[in-house]
Amino acid sequence: MTHIVVLGAGIGGMSAAYELRGTLGAGVDITVIGEGDNFSFTPSNPWVAVGWRKPSEVQIQVPPRLAKHRIAFEGAGADKVEPDANRVLLRDGRYIDYDYLVIATGPRLAFDEIPGLGPEGGYTQSICTTGHAATGWDAYQEFLKAPGPIVVGAAAGASCFGPAYEFAMILDKDLRKRKLRDKVPITYVSPEPYVGHMGLGGVGDSKGLMESEFRQRHIQWIVNAKITEVRDGEMDVAEIGEDGQPKKTHTLPFKYSMVLPAFTGVDAVRQGEGLCNPRGFILIDKHQRNPAYKNIYSIGVCVAIPPVEATLVPTGAPKTGFMIESMVTAVAKNIEAELKGEAGSAEATWNAICLADMGDTGAAFVALPQIPPRNVTWAKVGKWVHLAKIAFEKYFMMKIKSGNTEPIYEKYVLKLLGIVRTR
């Protein structure tokens, strides 16, 4: 029987496992390889880091959920993908053979690229994982006892800016609620060429929209910024000029800081000529298939996508939920076609739809397609976005618990935004 291995048990990996089962039926074996037994709903991590959610509220035990759909699970984690041998070496020394491999690992968090960055041996917090967000909540509680300056932002090469914007404004809301906002200067630091760029070259009037929100909330910003070093309570930042050289330097004091790192591919996939680019991201064609290994597909943050445009400080293109969902569907359809002896022709839409929470309101960004020129570009702010993100969290958690393969973004978010997508 054909054996499909899904490497990764996050939003992309779990969605892929369920959709593969729903598309292919009982005639294939499916195994998911994860890091531990928990699925975490990553978009809720900013709320975890300020105590608005507990980790247990955004996590689900994976093995029993998958078992209901006859999907096997290995929680030991992958040590190495061996594409020439069609197998994955687990960290406990066992091998898992596959006929098809779907890589959905997410990224390696490259804190090591900046001295002092990150929660493990560094001085800044992270919301990239639920474990990091929980550590961030512990640090935030200590901060509240003696508040002071906050620095929030992203490192050079980062590609997921939405959570940084969210977290800056969620902190603003939480501190106002605690009547401490007047004691806390907040600065947003980013490699983006302007506020609202988000690695997308802007969406609609996202520049004016986000600058306005920051001004209303008294959040200062530094863009074209490269963080060079972090020490206990201090961050060195260089503003880069048109000649590529620092035009101004800053030493920012902070009592609390959250910085999103650059991403690379995980160590386990850096095997095999032609599997990855130099940063470790999986190379794919327009059908999500690796050009060198035709039985390997990839989805989500771990795929190689070029930046939308060149920027003075490197920025990457984000992989949003809608994009990941469309990748999952394309992979399931293409593997189905191959099992029938046909050529897979399905392509992901790669549209960008983002619901960014701002604590008491929110911003919605739509870019169809994500890479310009676009058919639709649209950005709006309103309390309805905050409520929509809460609803989306609850619905997606229900989807993972139930094994539902419904395309959530396509069915609900696009309808919510009043956009009709032609199939």
Image (cartoon, rainbow, N blue to C red):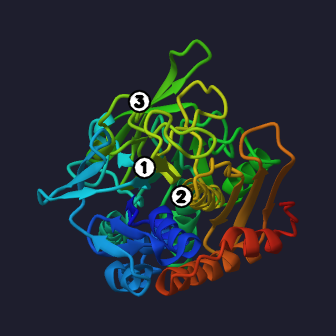
Can you identify the residue that label 1 sits on?
259
Instruction: Report the front residue among 22 and 138.
Output: 22
Tag of residue 274:
3
Local SS, label 1:
strand
297 is higher (above) or lower (below) than 25: above
Residue at coordinates 31% horizontally, 67% vertically from top-left?
131
Q: Position of residue 316 (x, y in %)?
A: 55, 38
Q: Is 115 left, or right, of 171 in this rendering?
A: left
Instruction: Report the front residue among 301 and 210.
Output: 301
Check the image and name the residue furthest to the top. 243
Disc 1 vs disc 2: which is toward the camera?
A: 2
Q: Is 224 left, or right, of 48 in this rendering?
A: right
- Given the image, on which type of amino acid does mark 1 rest? Val
Q: Position of residue 147 (x, y in %)?
A: 39, 64
Disc 3 vs disc 1: which is toward the camera?
A: 3
Residue at coordinates 40% horizontally, 49% vertically from top-left?
107
Cα separation, mark 3 vs mark 2, equals 24 Å
Q: Position of residue 406 (x, y in %)?
A: 64, 76
- Given the image, on which type of amino acid does mark 2 rest? Leu
- Mark closest to the chain's N terminus, 3 or 2: 3
Instruction: Report the front residue among 396 and 82.
Output: 82
Check the image and name the residue furthest to the left. 93
User: Could you tell me if residue 114 is visible in this image?
Assistant: no
Cα separation, mark 1 vs mark 2, equals 44 Å
Residue at coordinates 52% horizontally, 68% vertically from top-left?
20
Can you identify the residue that label 2 sits on?
339
